[in-house]
Amino acid sequence: MVTVTMNEDLTWRVFLGTLIVDPHERQRIADAIGINPVTLIRWTTNKSNPRPDSLRRLVEVLPLQREALKALIIKEYPNAFHTLQQKEELIDVSATFYAHVLNSYTSNPSHVRTRNICALILQQILKHLDPHEKGMITLVAQCMPPREGRYVRSLRQTIGRGTHVLGGNLIENHTQFFGAESQAGHALNTLHPIVIQSRAEKERLFPLHAWEVEESSVAYPILLADQTVGVFCLASTQARLFTQAHLDILQKYVYLLTLAFDAAQFFALSDLALGVMPPRPQQLSFITQFKQRMIHMQLMHEHSPLPHAQAELLIWQDLEEELLCLPPS
């Protein structure tokens, strides 16, 4: 990370210049804003002036330098963030909803608690952050329970919700595996949220798992001390959606998600060793075998039937292992 000493003579142009020395970072920022990398250089050398919306996007894609950069920009453009400040006036997670989640936690029996609380929270996020249903998907990808003595090698989507414009019912029945190659896997490996503000940025960083209509997306690890249950993911059809206000609100919902899971569903961070999963189209030929494999397993254990949950887990473990063994695409 570049360290810059703040002083009265420092301008946002000079500060930005220190942040884009690395050509890969310069390209990332340009993709997220939707401009040419050369334009960034022209800004830093005072050869061109950015539009107000470009300035607002600039601070959004640099969260660690956001406040310092914003303060410097205001020196030259005092009114640059008036619209942004209005946009960030989102209503916080309500006390009523916290109470609703706690009530669900205490009233649901353990075998339905995970699904019911997750569904409640995912649906509320859609209502909160996409009230006009422009297009949003929320999902939870849980750590795949490994066979005894092994590491957690992947995540599997276990529940999802989406707005009607994106086929909300289809999302509920959708599943796929994610590994280290994915945005979700990267969030879990780094233990930090991974924010993507444009489709170009997603296709460059995580090309294997981009939705066709996805513009911006975020992945948050679901953590409890030194353990994890998986990752929360959100994808939107709106480019550059996430302001700091959005991210703060989402973190609160992720904290609430920890209540949805039993202790046995969490895994120590030291037990993570994510592999690489193929893209979803390649996974589908395996995933669609699930029902047939269930029937086959029931026939094999006809005289000593396995509990349904145990049979399902064994099949998912087999599918995971087969997918991890596929050659890179």
Image (cartoon, helix red, strand yellow):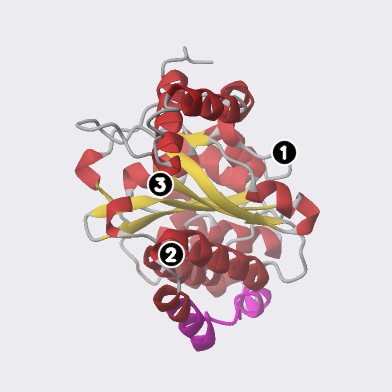
Asked if disc 1 and disc 2 are in contact, CB closer than 8 Å, the reply is no
| Residue 212 tag number | 1
- Give the distance between the C-alpha atoms of the residues marked 1 and 2, in whole angstroms: 27 Å
| Residue 288 tag number | none
Q: Residue at x 47, y 75 (%)?
A: 104
Residue under numbered circle 2: 257
Q: Residue at x 23, y 39 (%)?
A: 271
Start-end of magenta stretch: 80-102
Name which of mark 3 and mark 2 comes first in the sequence.
Answer: 3
Asked if disc 3 and disc 2 are in contact, CB closer than 8 Å, the reply is no
Q: Is residue 246 above or below residue 269?
A: below
- Give the distance between the C-alpha atoms of the residues marked 3 and 1, in whole angstroms: 21 Å
The quadrant the C terminus occupies is top right
| Callout 2 amino acid | Leu
Asked if disc 3 and disc 1 are in contact, CB closer than 8 Å, the reply is no
- View extreme (bottom): residue: 95
Q: Is residue 93 magenta?
A: yes
Label 1 SS:
loop
| Residue 187 tag number | 3
Question: Which mark's residue is nearer the viewer, 3 or 2?
Answer: 2
Q: Is residue 257 above or below residue 174?
A: below
Name the one closer to the observer, 218 or 162.
162
Is residue 44 in view from this perspective?
Answer: no
- Give the distance between the C-alpha atoms of the residues marked 3 and 2, in whole angstroms: 16 Å
Q: Is residue 124 magenta?
A: no
Q: Position of residue 311 (x, y in %)?
A: 43, 35
